[in-house]
Amino acid sequence: MGVGERPGGGGPGVSFLVLMLTTRCNLSCAYCYAAGAARPGDMPPALAQEALEGFHRPGRRLTVELAGGEPLLRFELLAQLVRSWASRPEVRFAVQTNALLLDRERLELLREFGVGLGISLDGTPAVNNLTRGGGRRVFRALELVGRAGLGVNLTVVLTRHNLERLPEFLLACAAQPAVRVINLDLLRPLGRGAGSDLTPEPGQIQAVVPRMLQVLGFINARRWPPLKVREVEQARRRRGGGRRPYCLAAEGRYAAVAPDGRVFPCASLAGDPAWSVGQVGEKGLEASLAAAVEDWGLPAACADCPLHAVCRGGCPARRIAFSGGVGGICELECALRKAINQGMTS
């Protein structure tokens, strides 16, 4: 997508829906993005069903991520939604959790209904405890996930505490058969993360990426299925060019619903009144979502960068968090994408 181009007007409609079942959580992460942003509360069951009905279109694939807060605190509602929509094959559910409440019963429901599983984990137990807590319990949950025959994507928030330990973390994940993909999320200055000293430096990223790639190669010469890092896979896929926006949110095909029913174009912006496009049940929400992201294309500063087809300007929500506007850039993401590309070509 070129500078100033729109990501597709009305587009094909929402294909990824996030339902924030609660703002409550059983952890108190040092950088929690939601802290101080989302209004406290639980999503009423009727509202969750209304949101699903409102964004579902027969025959159109819809992925529904059940999130929070900690969504397993609302396991009864989670199970109700999954069961009540099981007869519609075009709807797929996923849950993003800190895993502390995972047990055999809950994993059996996820397995029975094909619910995708994402877990937030910032490193080996000792490293994870520096920012999140519950590290050993999460690794025990990963063992349960493996015994249940499920796969899991891990999301790692990169901070000063864990960045240099990332290669060590990859080795720990390689010993967990359930772990398939690791997503790298650069710390954003939001919520408790605003004004903290947790944000890494570009130089740290440039130093660790070659070691990360070396360890990843070592692991995958010995492991099946391979352990993937999302950002490395994106670089491989996108080297052929292409003009699609960075993500579904930038295409206007993503909606996040807060517990009070407010709708946002990205879960990372949920709770910010400036990005609310309306309430569940209102008419024209899909058009409003498309209009809200019409300038989420490639920033002008990226137009002459030879890697813009690979990074596509980076995460728009991250650009907003770091620069104050979607037209800015995130230097940390630039450093990460460039280091990965260089490491893959050297």
Image: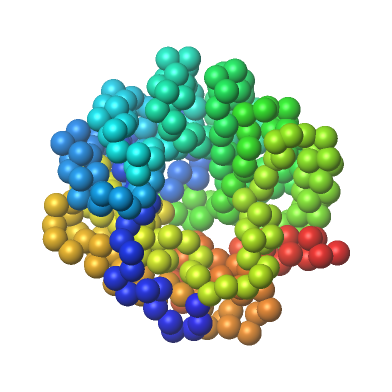
The picture quadrant where one finds residue 101 is top left
Q: Nearer the viewer, residue 30 or 170?
A: 170
Specify how the rendered protein is coloured. Answer: rainbow
Furthest-front residue in view?
59
Where in the figure is residue 55, as x and y percent of width and height? 25, 51
Name the residue at the left extreme.
Answer: 282
Q: Is residue 184 above or below residue 273?
A: above
* In this view, 85 is above or below 212: above
145 is higher (above) or lower (below) than 243: above
At 52% from the left edge and 35% from the top edge, which residue is drawn?
Answer: 119
Q: Residue at x 20, y 39 (%)?
A: 49
Residue 170, located in which quarter of the rendered image?
Answer: top right
Q: Is residue 190 left or right of residue 74?
A: right
Location of the C terminus by quadrant is bottom right
Is 217 in front, or is 129?
A: 217
Q: Quadrant of residue 152?
A: top right
Residue 140 drawn at (x, y percent): 60, 19
Instruction: Report x, y in % for residue 153.
Output: 56, 39
| Left or right: where 177 falls relative to 317 | right
Left or right: 42, with 282 as reference point = right
Left or right, 3 with respect to 276, comes to right
Number of marks drawn: 0
1 or 268: nearer the viewer: 1
Taking the image as drawn, is residue 149 in sight? yes
Check the image and report above or below for 216 versus 85.
below
Give the residue displayed 24% in from the left and 67% down from the top: 288
Taking the spot 55% from the left edge, 27% from the top edge, the residue there is 150
On the question of residue 81 being in view, the answer is no
In the image as oriented, which residue stretches furthest toward the top? Answer: 104
- In x, y percent, where is residue 279? 18, 54
